[in-house]
């Protein structure tokens, strides 16, 4: 990294702020000494102009619509790689050779079972509980079962808990779905791929063999790749902040799942399909476009807009292509796809969306595919959490193994009352 510096003048005092450069992307102003030298904080609610950390995992150029995982473009990974291979890449920084991939896949496969007592947690939930509520509870409980790998100071412990989380999240997710539909849990099978195993645990039943459809397995695996990691998004920042206190990785990932659930973040895929269903047919689109533009109407086009992408989300491009592949493989056709395509076309030609640089994001088309495969909308964010677990784990490992890592503790602009004396109750 090359360093130069910026100069800030406050109250007649000149303060030099080092400027740090990464390998690509915007430089940063190092303000770590600013408060000590000026007695002032910076102010950036929502962190629109704030880098929270160094990271070598994922790079996004929002203006160009570029997404790189350890330098590899998402389009190439989606086309040529697999979720297991991308998981290895995110965790280790390099694409694996054949032996490395085989060993990694075997390790993950052999961690896919969950402690038998964990299955008891599900019966404590209502059958109609939102599966994300179940995920928050069950993943948070993992540290009660795997405390033999929660010594975060030990690299071997970190590796084992990382593998356990990546391996068990599909099993936990499939069980959340099975519980919601009143069907028995299926144990994982070691002869299936990571994604094939998940599809069987989700849609298979003990009464007959489940046949994994290769095109669906490939589409699902690609959807996992598209959701694997995304720089310092809200849920990843949550995982990092939780981890900065030394909390165990299972608790940190549960915190990430909770944050991802929000409709402004990972919950948008469920909200986007519900929105498309509410719109129904293309003739209703203008009404909803007008609602999305109305400052007095809280309605937003779900699956549109992004804090970083001010161009087309490259993941949405792949997702749109995958819709057609799944429709062809399953010989289905959902008219909502035509509604989505028309909505995109109208929005992208509307001055409001053009001026605010609002484009479809990863959540806009994903629901149509997931619905065609057979998932209820309530499972969409669970699938996002399943895939993002490897990104969260990779980012957590990067943070914890940084010798300069400190607990995250932001300050504030205080707007409350100045000091005042207590008033006894009988005098109020
Ligand atoms: C994900 O961070 C990540 O990387 C997240 C993610 C990941 O992989 O981790 O990419 C996954 O969360 C994708 C985003 C999913 N969310 C949605 O699709 C929900 C709908 N989108 C919006 O809520 C919004 O676009 C956000 C939350 C995604 C981004 O919000 P920002 O960056 O805080 O932008 P903003 O809310 O300040 O909006 C800027 C302007 C506003 O108008 P003005 O106040 O300037 O007049 O654009 C408008 C907004 O009203 N706007 C929209 C809109 N999104 C923004 N107007 C209508 N419809 C929308 N979808």
Image (cartoon, helix red, strand yellow):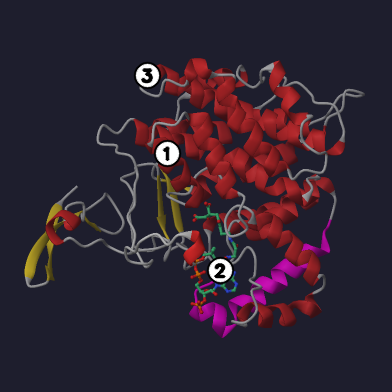
Q: Nearer the viewer, residue 201 or 262?
A: 262
Circle 3 packing at 10 Å, graded few (<14), some (14-19), many (20+), is few
Is the CB of mark 3 within 8 Å of ligand 1? no
Mark 3–mark 2 Cα distance, whole angstroms, equals 43 Å
Question: Going 80% across and 50% down the picture, which residue do you hit?
Answer: 372
Quarter of the figure with residue 350: bottom right
What is the x, y in percent for residue 240? 42, 41
Q: Is residue 324 visible?
A: no
Q: Quadrant of residue 14?
A: bottom left
Label disc, if present, on residue 395 of the rendered structure: 1
To which residue does mark 2 refer?
359
| Label 2 with label 1: CB-CB less than 8 Å | no
Q: Position of residue 425 (x, y in %)?
A: 50, 60
From the viewer's perspective, is 158 left or right of 343? left
Q: Is disc 2 placed on a helix, strand or loop? A: loop
Q: How far from the left and from the top, in percent, is residue 305?
A: 55, 67
Q: Which residues are magenta?
A: 333-359
354 is higher (above) or lower (below) than 280: below
Circle nearer the N terminus (3, 1): 3
Q: Earlier in the sequence, mark 2 or mark 1?
A: 2
Q: Is residue 351 magenta?
A: yes
Give the residue pinned by disc 3. Answer: 154
What residue is at 37 percent from the left and 37 percent from the top?
A: 244
Residue 251 in view (yes/no): yes
Inter-mark Cα distance, 3 to 1:
17 Å
Q: Residues within 10 Å of mark 2 (few under 14, many from 20)?
A: many
Closer-to-camera residue (172/407): 407
Do residues under tags 3 and 1 come within 8 Å of each other at their CB atoms?
no
User: What is the residue that sits farthest to the left in this orientation?
Assistant: 13
Residue 275 covered by magenta stretch: no
Residue at far front of view: 426
């Amino acid at each position: 990294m090359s360093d130069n510096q910026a100069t800030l003048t406050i109250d007649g005092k000149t303060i030099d702020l080092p400027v740090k450069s990464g390998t690509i992307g915007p430089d940063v102003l190092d303000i770590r000494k600013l408060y000590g030298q000026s007695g002032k904080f910076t102010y950036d609610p929502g962190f629109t102009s704030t880098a929270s950390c160094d990271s070598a995992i994922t790079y996004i150029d929002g203006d160009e619509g570029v997404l790189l995982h350890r330098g590899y473009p998402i389009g190439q990974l989606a086309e040529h790689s697999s979720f297991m291979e991308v998981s290895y890449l995110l965790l280790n920084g390099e694409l694996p050779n054949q032996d490395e991939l085989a060993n990694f896949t075997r390790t993950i496969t052999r961690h896919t079972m969950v402690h038998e007592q964990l299955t008891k947690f599900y019966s404590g939930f209502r059958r109609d509980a939102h599966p994300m509520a179940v995920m928050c509870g069950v993943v948070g409980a993992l540290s009660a079962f795997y405390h033999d790998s929660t010594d975060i100071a030990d690299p071997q412990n970190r590796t084992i808990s990382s593998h356990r989380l990546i391996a068990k999240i599909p099993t936990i997710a499939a069980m959340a779905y099975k519980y919601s539909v009143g069907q028995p849990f299926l144990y994982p099978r070691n002869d299936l791929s990571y994604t094939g195993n998940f599809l069987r645990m989700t849609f298979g039943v003990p009464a007959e063999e489940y046949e994994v459809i290769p095109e669906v397995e490939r589409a699902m695996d690609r959807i996992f790749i598209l959701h694997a990691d995304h720089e310092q998004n809200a849920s990843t920042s949550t995982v990092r902040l939780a981890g900065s206190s030394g909390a165990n990785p299972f608790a940190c990932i549960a915190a990430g799942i909770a944050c991802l659930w929000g409709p402004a973040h990972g919950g948008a895929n469920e909200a986007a399909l519900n929105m498309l269903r509410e719109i129904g047919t293309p003739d209703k689109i203008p009404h909803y476009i007008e609602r999305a533009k109305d400052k007095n109407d809280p309605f937003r086009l779900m699956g549109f807009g992004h804090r970083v992408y001010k161009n087309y989300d490259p993941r949405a491009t792949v997702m749109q292509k995958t819709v057609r592949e799944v429709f062809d493989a399953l010989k289905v056709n959902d008219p909502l796809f035509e509604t989505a395509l028309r909505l995109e076309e109208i929005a992208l030609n509307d001055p409001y969306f053009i001026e605010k640089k609002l484009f479809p994001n990863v959540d806009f088309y994903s629901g149509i595919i997931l619905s065609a495969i057979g998932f209820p909308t309530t499972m969409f964010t669970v699938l996002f959490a399943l895939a993002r677990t490897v990104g969260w784990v990779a980012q957590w490992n990067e943070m914890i193994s940084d010798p300069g890592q400190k607990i995250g503790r932001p300050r504030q602009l205080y707007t409350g009352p100045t000091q005042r004396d207590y008033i006894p109750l009988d005098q109020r």
